[in-house]
Amino acid sequence: MDIHFIMRPGRLRSLPRSARPERRQRGQALVFALFTSVLVILALFAMYSMGGQTIEKIKLQNTADAAAYSAALAEARDYNFSAYTNRAMVANQVGVAQFVGLTSWFRNLSAFTNNNDSANLGRSVLYELMMNIWPGGTLKSLYKTVYKGIGTVAGVFDEGKLGSTFMKGAITLLDGLIRVYSESQRVYHYATALTVTQTLGVFDSLGQTLDNMLGVTLFKGPLSILDGDGSILKANDDKVQLTTSSAFYLGYHFYKWFNFTEFKNPNMDAGGDGANAERFAQVTTDSLDDFSRDRSTKPAWGFAFFYAPPLTFVDPTVFIPYTSGPLFLPVFHRGGTELKVTNDAGTGAPAGTGGGTGDSGVDCNGNPVSSASPPLVVDYHSQLPGGGYTGCDGDTGTVQLGDAAHPAGAYARNAGQWVDTRCFGTTPPAGCPTTTRTPTPAPAANGNAHPGGAGSKSKRSWTAMDASSFSGLDIFWISILGIPIPLPIPFVPPWVPVSHGAAQSGKQLSKPDVLSGDNNFGHDASNAYGESLSSWTTKISAAMQQEKGAGTSLTLSPNTFGGLTQYMDVKDIAAENLTGPPLVIEVEKNVSDMPKNPATGQFATANGAPVRKLDNLGKMRSLSKAQVYFSRPTTDSGLDWFKRTIGSAGATELGSLYNPYWQARLMPNDFIEQYISMEIHRAGLL
């Protein structure tokens, strides 16, 4: 059976108030919600505007940093390009010196093996006598055959032969490359200035400023030269440009940049290359290989007194009893290649600039003199200059006896003549030249300075000389009571000339100065050409070559090419030069070109920024600073190839344009730069 319970309305059991459901409140929170929504919306729009401007400020700063760093990097590449090309010029100069030295060495070898110098009695008579005094001998025949074969090869390098023509072409090519490297430094340097301005968007900013001033689009457009590509600013944000005040920053920077480095000319008087005019020449000569520097025969087989060049003949078969003949004919060889210091005429060094590491120098005629040489003393004026000495302006002499026209007393060389020193006074005596009143200063003492320093002139020629001499020892067998006894017989002293050779390139030098030892850069007369001029073993051979000169220059156009040329280096080489001039830039962007609050009406907000009076536009600005610096790795194990091999590993190398270790970095702007920027921006001046 179904039972149904019927619930009737209104018959509920009464419940306590705490258990009853509350009645819903309607309409009381509406006003609070409306005010809260307005505040939230305003906060959201404000946050949107501030966030947008913050992002724009970060982007603007990144753009400024990218432009400044890129510009500094371009300048670092300019310095490194100069360093690489300076190294290339030094390497090519070393190559020229090698070719000149090889030519001289081959000519000396040819003179010996071909016996082609009839004036050289040592080779044409004595050496042949030593070889032929006892006919026969297998080793002698083999030796003659070998060195005649060598002579066939070496002979092609004689003056005017095919080998010399090849050397002339190779040297001219190297000299041409040196000139190309030198001129490319100049082109690249000035092109870097253009690159920096283009990188910083100078043309674009200048065009925009001119258009703003005129109120028309004339200078900034696709057809304008002031709207070129390559701007880092434009690549990051085409609405960003340099501020007007950046022109002052850039002007000052370029002034410092152009004065940080300069083109130096090692072929000018003092002032053309500063007080250290020998810097490039010294780097070049220090870079020469051993063959070019000194190819003299070195001690062999552990005997310091015995020299064994390839032409030394040794015949141990003479120790066979009764086989008499030469035991050995040692050939002594000395030679080297020198960078010459010449005057304008190309005949040697100017007065007082020769001498290398010693005290000797050369006068105005290329003759060797001493920096502390006493004045000439003669009996009569007619004997000035005495002893074969050719006077130069500034030289002094003393006449002991004199005559009516030229009384005894002190004389000085002036304008090519010897003049009584009393003629230089305010009241000269009768008989003095009327045009001579001021004494010519004597040449500066050379001291221990290298030739090529301040006061020197051209270093435009390479010369080389090789000289060989020989000695001899015979074994002569005698029999005493039937017992064979060898007798060693020295045949000739070790200074008999065998052969000699020489060569030159660059500016054609005339003899006798062409092979002078006093106008060599870096060597004095006693050390020139591997000491061939001063060594007792080769002095006669060297003197014979010196009389002949070095022959025709191996440069096709010796008056145009050859020798050292202009190069780029830091201007003040006495400074540390670890950093280049800093580059400061300031960029700006119109706030109207930035994203802004999309709301309108009472919810609209504007991007605030100081207004520039020139165009009445609000601007956001950012400063940036970059710098080029020099740093060679010293302790990084991963950069062992770049470590210095001279001096301590931790030593700091000073900046120069010989090593390509120039880099770029960003730097913080100092207080003065920030203050000036803020004040100009606040006042809306530029």
Image (cartoon, rainbow, N blue to C red):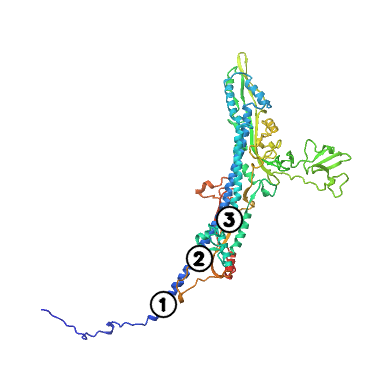
Using the rendered view, name the quadrant where residue 6 is placed: bottom left
SS type, badge 2: helix
Residue behind mark 3: 194
In the rendered view, would you say 522 is above or below 492? below
Q: Are marks 2 and 1 in contact (CB under 8 Å)?
A: no
Say what amino acid the circle numbered 1 marks.
Thr
SS type, badge 3: helix
Mark 3 packing: few (<14 Cα in 10 Å), some, or many (20+)? Answer: few
Mark 1 packing: few (<14 Cα in 10 Å), some, or many (20+)? Answer: few
Using the rendered view, name the quadrant where residue 219 is placed: bottom right
SS type, badge 1: helix
Q: Viewer-proximal residue, 497 or 237?
A: 237
Answer left or right for 348 relative to 654.
right
Q: Quadrant of the N terminus?
A: bottom left
Q: Position of residue 686 (x, y in %)?
A: 59, 67
Q: Position of residue 327 (x, y in %)?
A: 61, 23
Residue behind mark 1: 36
Answer left or right for 254 relative to 639.
right
Q: Position of residue 444 (x, y in %)?
A: 74, 45
Answer left or right for 452 relative to 14.
right
Q: Earlier in the sequence, mark 3 or mark 2?
A: 2
Let me know if residue 177 appears in the view: yes
**Between marks 1 and 3 in the image, the one whose residue lies nearer the viewer:** 3
Measure how far apart labels 3 and 2 are at the Cα level: 28 Å
Measure how far apart labels 2 and 1 are at the Cα level: 31 Å
Residue behind mark 2: 57
Say what amino acid the circle numbered 3 marks.
Leu
